[in-house]
Image (cartoon, rainbow, N blue to C red):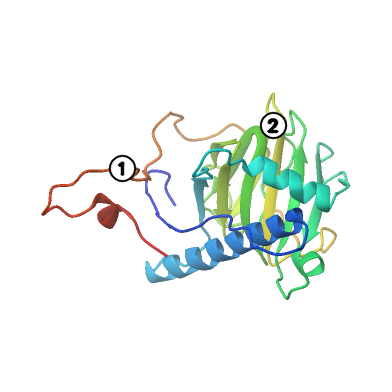
Amino acid sequence: MAIDRALVMGGLEVAIPPGDTPAGTRVLAGIVAMAEQAVERFHRTAKQAGRPGASAVLSRLRGTGRGISFTRLVGELERAHPLTLDYPFEGSDRVGGAVWIAREILGNKSTTSVAKLCWDSRAMDLPMHVHDHSDRFIIVLKGRGFFHVTGESAETFTGTSVRSIPARERDVFLFTRGTVHTFSTDAEPMVLLSCQLPFLDFNDPRQYRLPRLRWTAKERPDSYRAGIACDPGWSVLAERPAASAVSLADVLTIGP
């Protein structure tokens, strides 16, 4: 999916359910619900548009009121359910990971997990790969890095059309199974929350697969024109339309 095309999916938010369970547990429930809703809606929208193949899209988390902090919410999750990171992750000594499994913590039938992935600075050795059996909904929690992606399949991957998109705090990447991709960091470290739908154990041989051609951010240059531009999707924050005018929100927003 080209970066200059906009797909608008409204109504996706981290809704923390009420209850007597620890706040961090309810934060996990909210993140899992948002990820599952986003992936289901994306598949439905892509099918309706006649584009059901592997795709990747980018969005960004934004608070809607004073005192709202996604980082603090995740801090509640980590206090309630601390993790110990395991290195290496998917073959990279500079990446560590651990996972919250929804069904074990929430006591439901969800097949989703949320992995915390910590990237050291200069983590540039994780090759392009593909997840054949699960979709990903990934939130950049801290730091800065790059998301590398291509529209080529793993079987036909030539490395000639890899795009490197800056990954910054609160960016959200959604990509479907079969999408050839990787992440890397430069001078800064980065922390990701990777919602995996469905979850496969990190040691499961079906977890990921490498194309025949090896591509890493360290070894290969990008092959497209770099630039800086506004995101194509704009949120309508306020307007004062004429009495007979159609609302911009009605024109620009695709609801749930």
The kind of secondary structure element at disc 1 is loop
The kind of secondary structure element at disc 2 is loop
In the displayed structure, would residue 138 be above or below residue 19? above
> Going by the image, does 41 lie left or right of 72?
left
Residue 91's tag is none
For mark 1, does the 10 Å Cα neighbourhood hold few (<14), some (14 to 19), or many (20 or more) residues?
few
Q: Residue at x 37, y 42 (%)?
A: 232
Residue 218's tag is 2
Residue 254 in sight here: yes
Q: Quadrant of residue 34?
A: bottom right
| Residue beneath disc 1 | 238
Amino acid at circle 1: Ala
Q: Quadrant of residue 112?
A: bottom right
Amino acid at circle 2: Lys
Residue 215 in sight here: no
Q: Nearer the viewer, residue 146 or 248?
A: 248
In the displayed structure, would residue 204 be above or below residue 118? below
